[in-house]
Image (tube, rainbow, N blue to C red):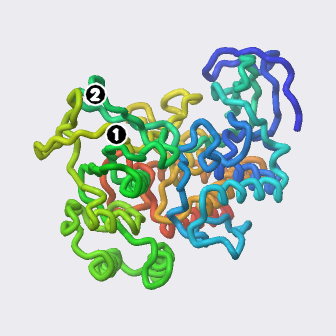
Amino acid sequence: MSTSTDQGSSGSGDTRHQQDPAVSDRGETVCVIGAGASGLTAVKNLREHGFDVDCYERETGVGGAWNWRHDRSPVYAATHLISSKPFTQFPDFPMPDDWPDYPHHSMLLSYFERYADHFDLRRHIWFGTEVVRVEPAEGERWDVTTRSTGGYGVERTSRYAAVIVANGHNWSPKMPEYEGLADFRGEVIHASAYKDVKQLRDRKVLVVGAGNTGCDIAVEAAQAAAACWHSTRRGYWYAPKYVLGRPADQVNDAALRMRLPVWLRQWLFHRILRLTVGDLTRYGLPRPDHKVYETHPIANSQLVYYAGHGRIRPVPDVARFDRYDVELTDGRRIEPDLVVLATGYLPRFEFLAPGLLGDEDSGRPSLYLNTFPAGRPTLAVAGLVQPDSGIFPISHWQTVLIARALRLRRTDPRRAEAFAERVRSGVGQRYAGRVKESSRHWFEVGHVDYLRAVQRALDGLEKAA
C-alpha cells in the first residue's frame, strides 16, 4: 500500500486547483470509507474488477458494528443474528457448516477477520484513520482529508477517482425529546450504551422502543431486573425465530420466491401467528395498527413469552418525565430507576457536505437502489439498507454493481452515461412495498425485490445504450 506525502487541509467545493501541492494524487485509486461488512466487500469487489483501493477505518480492526470493542458498536454481550446463517453470509464466503442458525456476534467478528485474510484485504486498509472531509474536485474526482485517530491531529488530503461510503448507519443514536427528561433523577441511557445484563440487574427498568434491540433488552431485563416495563408507541408484529421447524426467514423466503401476492403472504403470516403466538392483546401488547409486511416483523421468540409470565409489562408511549417518575400517555405513572432508550439511529455522513446525497432537508439520502446519488457518478453508498433478511449478500451485490459501473466509465463512457441517466430517473424508488413514514423505515427493503432490481441494473450495464 502506498503512503501519502505530508499534506495540509485545504478549501472545499469544485474549485480546488488540480496541481495543489498539498493534495496527493492517487490517480485511478478508489477510496472506501469503513472496514465493516460493506466496506470489506467493497474492497474485495473493487480489487476483483481491477481497481486499486485505499480503505480508511477509524478503528484498529475490521468488523465495524460487529466488533463490539469499537467505540461506535451497538453490539451488546448477548447479540445474535436475527437473520439466519444462509441468508446472512456473503455468497462467495460461506459460514462454517457447524455454526448455529443464528450465530453469536463473536462468531460474526471472526467471520469478517477470516474474510479479510482470505481475500488479502488488510493491506489495502488504513486502520486508526478517520475521514474528516470528502469534497468534489475536478473531473468528477474527490479530495479525501484524513487524520489519525491516535491523537496526532495531522490532516492529509488525497485525490481519488471515486469514493464508496460504507461507514454504517447504526452508530449515531436517535435521541427522543420528552418534557422533563433533563430533570429526571434516574439513569437514562441510549441502547447504544447498553453492553451487558449486569447493567440491568436488580434495577427497575423502562425500555422505550419496539425494534429488535429494544425487544432483546426487554427480554434480558425480564430475566435480571427487579421490574421491566416495555414502552411502545404502536403495536407491532412479533414473529418467532422458528416456524415449521425452520428459521422464519427461510420460510418467508420460500413464499417470496414463489412470487405469492402480498395479500396471500399476509394471510399465511396471520395464520401462522394465530397458531404460534395467538392474540397479542392477551399479553397486554397493543394491537398492530398496520398490516404485516408494511413494516418488518420483530424477530423475537421470547418477548411474548415473558409478557405472558408477567416479567415484561407492556405500556404505552411516554408522555413526560418528572423528577422521580414517568407519566405514560394513558395517565399511569411508573417509577423506573433506569431508562433505556432503544429509539434507533440516524444516518450520519459527517464528512460529506449536505446535499451531496440528496439529503439537504430531511437528512434522508435520496439514492438510486439506496446506493447512487443523482449527478455524482463517482460517489456511492454501500450497505444503506434495512432488509427483511441478511444485509451482507445485499452489500456484496451492491458493490459488484458499483465496481462494474465505475469500470464502465473507463471502458465505454457512452454506456456509462446511459447508466447515469437511469440513476437520475430512479432516485428515491422504494423496494419494500408500503411502509410507515418514519426514520426507522427509511431504508427498509424486501431482499428479493431489491436483489432483482440490482440484477436488472447489472444486466442493463451489459446492454448497448
The residue sitting at the right extreme is: 2
Name the element at disc 1.
Answer: strand
Q: Identify residue for label 1.
A: 339
Does residue 171 appear anywhere in the picture? yes
Q: Which of 407 and 284 is in front in this view?
A: 284
Give the mark, 1 or 2, whose residue is nearer the N terminus. Answer: 2
Q: Identify residue for label 2.
A: 184
Name the element at disc 2.
Answer: loop
Q: Which of 155 and 10 is in front in this view?
A: 155
Which image quadrant: the N terminus?
Answer: top right
Above or below: residue 314 compared with residue 59:
below
Tell me where residue 410 appears, x and y as whole percent: 77, 47
Tell me where residue 55 appears, x and y as whole percent: 74, 40
Left or right side of 173 for 185: left
Q: Residue at image x 76%, y 27%? A: 158
* Residue density around tag 1, few if under 14, some if 14–19, many if 20 or more, within 10 Å: many
Left or right side of 259 for 306: left
Tell me where residue 460 appears, x and y as whole percent: 61, 63
Q: Residue at image x 69%, y 19%? A: 16
Q: Residue at image x 61%, y 50%? A: 66
